[in-house]
Amino acid sequence: MLPFQPEFPLVAGLCMYMTETEQFCDQAIKLHFIHFNKKMEVVRLPAVSRVAVCGGTHGNELSGVYLVRELQKKKGEKADNFSLTTVMSNPRAVEQCRRYIETDLNRCFTTAILSAPVSGETPYEMVRAQELNTLLGPRGTAKATDLICDLHNTTANMGLCFISSSDSDWIRLHICKHLQMEMPSVSVRYLTFDTEPSFLSSVAKHGFAMEIGPQPHGVVRADTFNTMKEGVRLMLDWIQKFNSGVLFDGEEMEVYTVVETIDYPRDAETHLITATIHPQLQDQDFSLLHPGDPLFLTFSGNTVTYKGTEALHPIFVNECAYYEKHIALQLAQKKKVVVPSIQLKRD
Ligand SMILES: [Zn+2]
């Protein structure tokens, strides 16, 4: 076992079958990381004192629904060095096992909707978004919950994905890194949307969605449920350690940013889809899609290729809930983010 290997998973495994030049380069990479860590200043951050785990934001994504119910049974057990709130975000949709009743709750946390006057005509989810903003926020204030983990499932082959609107929130990135190290058999990735926040998780100071798939909506599978349960346990474990004063070393991390959305080919008159995701692309989330690669297979048997000019990473490929949103898949760019070492700021 190489002495550096546990600390440097990015370069781990490179040393087998290497030429002398390659071994020299490998050593140089390791030395670079040692200097990188030594030079880096430790960023001190306030405690993560109030945590909320939310499920059922989409009422038919059942891992989160059942995990929140499990966590609620443990209510009253000794809290750690933070308080934990559990929330069933959209109880009416959960009761009917539907994504939503009138409109998608997880697109209702925009400034416009949160500040709009409510009348008898206001859709249920918009009213509920304001209630949740009062309960867990208000967003952007000192009173807001420190961390929201909002639990979701996808029918796409996404593994375990942290989803947020920023690539510079060190608490979120360190929690993601903790899961990457502690759950080596699961693909754990960090994904950002560069748009106005509209997700429930945006109400907190450090909110994120924990998205796990593939799992059909309306179904709860043991493997997916257990991955989510372990992910949440590790997140709470990380918060406990951070609040106790443990120093977390910095590292370069991979972050995906969504840059493009692609709809299915549609009939010009009926607007019905005329193709499905190409078999070579189905389930290939986070692989690399090159210009000219197959994208769709039309119902008449023709292949439609990717016309973009740069290779990008497909995500949410053939997500069931996105047909109505006219999204067949999205494309993301991968980049490296230098995440600093962090430690609790003591008063
Ligand atoms: Zn969802």
Image (cartoon, rainbow, N blue to C red):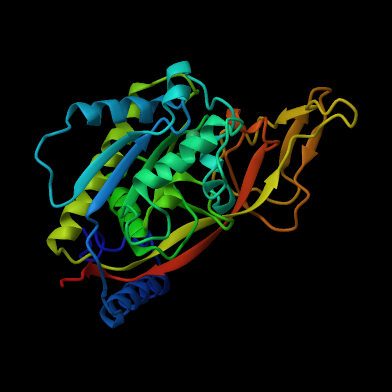
Q: Residue at x 71, y 43 (%)?
A: 262
Q: Is residue 320 left or right of residue 346?
A: right
Query: In the displayed image of the protein, which residue is found farthest to the right?
Result: 269
- Residue at the spot x=78%, y=27% of the render? 273
Tell me if 195 is positioned left or right of 246 in this view.
right
Pick out the residue farthest to the top: 96
Q: Position of residue 33 (x, y in %)?
A: 33, 74
Total numbered circles: 0
Q: Quadrant of the N terminus?
A: bottom left
The quadrant of the rendering that contains the C terminus is bottom left
Nearest to the observer: residue 307 or residue 129: 129
Q: Quadrant of residue 316?
A: top right
Residue at the extreme bottom: 39
- Please tell me which residue lies in front, 296 or 155: 155
> Image point 59% across, 56% down: which residue?
195
Residue 79, given in percent of the width and then of the height, sits at 13, 43
Q: In this view of the protein, can residue 81 be seen by the observer?
A: yes
Classify residue 34 by image quadrant.
Answer: bottom left
For this view, does 110 lie left or right of residue 219?
Answer: right
The residue at the far left in this view is 78
Q: Is residue 189 visible?
A: no
Q: Position of residue 15 (x, y in %)?
A: 34, 62
**Position above or below: 46 against 21:** above
Q: Nearer the viewer, residue 296 or 31?
A: 296
Residue at image position (75%, 58%) is: 309
**Image side of residue 44 versus residue 186, left or right:** left
